[in-house]
Amino acid sequence: MRSSNSDHRRVQTIVAVAIVGLMCSVPVKADTPHSLPEIEAEAVETIDATPVPAPEAETAVVEEATQPEFEHLADGEASYYGAELAGNRTASGEIFDPSELTAAHRSLPMGTKLRVTNQANGKSVVVRVNDRGPFVKRRIVDISRAAAEKISMIRAGKAQVTLELLR
């Protein structure tokens, strides 16, 4: 036996389909417009599309570049690492590369930047401390070959230098 609930639903469905069918079958008069009404567009002012150059930026006041500050550390003898140490690990853990501007110092923190100036010719180079040394008592710093070339100390192998700390 069917439930009265399902009969009621069936009747509702049949009635809904019948209403939709009747709505679809209503004739449309021939004089009824089948499109949207036309809307008149408002007149728009045309804009000149010629590019206009941007106004010149205000000239910034350029301050003179300040030179890095150096603090005098010591005067003494420097030597340079030979090529035979290339590829070895430095005290900082990096591989020694004679073409980089690096140095060995007994106590300065790794990464410290120093200016090394050859007292004989006034040439200087800024190096980064990445190793410990030198292990010869009278020397104050060992520098890489590239740094030694910059201050013209390759021929002698050592030079009297001034060490300055980059602040």
Image (cartoon, helix red, strand yellow):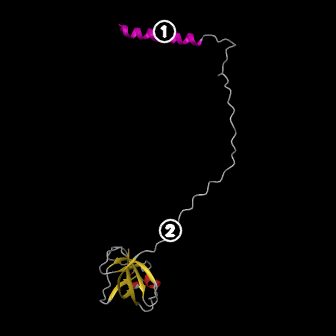
Left or right, 60 with respect to 162, comes to: right
- Amino acid beneath label 1: Val
Q: Main secondary structure of the magenta part?
A: helix
Does the magenta segment cover residue 54? no
Q: What residue is shown at x 31% (from left), y 80% (from top)?
A: 132
Left or right, 55 with respect to 111, comes to: right
In which quadrant of the rendered view does residue 148 lie? bottom left
- Residue 79: x percent and y percent? 38, 87
- Amino acid beneath label 2: Glu
Mark 1 or 2, which is nearer the eye? 2
Does the magenta segment cover residue 23? yes
Front-most of residues 91 and 149: 149
User: From the viewer's perspective, is residue 96 above or below residue 33?
Assistant: below
Front-most of residues 43 and 86: 43
- Residue 26: x percent and y percent? 61, 10
Q: What residue is shown at x 43% (from left), y 74% (from top)?
A: 68
Which segment is the magenta one? Answer: 1-24
Distance (Cα) linking label 1 and label 2: 88 Å
Is residue 2 visible in this depiction of the protein?
no
Q: Secondary structure at mark 2?
A: loop
Q: Which residue is mark 1?
A: 15
Q: Quadrant of the N terminus?
A: top left
Is residue 68 visible in this depiction of the protein?
yes
Task: Say which label, 1 or 2, has the lower sequence index.
Answer: 1
Q: Quadrant of the C terminus?
A: bottom left
Task: Determine whether label 1 and label 2 are within 8 Å by CB.
Answer: no
Left or right, 19 with respect to 68, comes to: right
Q: Which residue is mark 2?
A: 63
Q: Secondary structure at mark 1?
A: helix
Crowdedness of circle 1 by 10 Å Cα count: few (<14), some, many (20+)?
A: few
Front-most of residues 10 and 20: 20
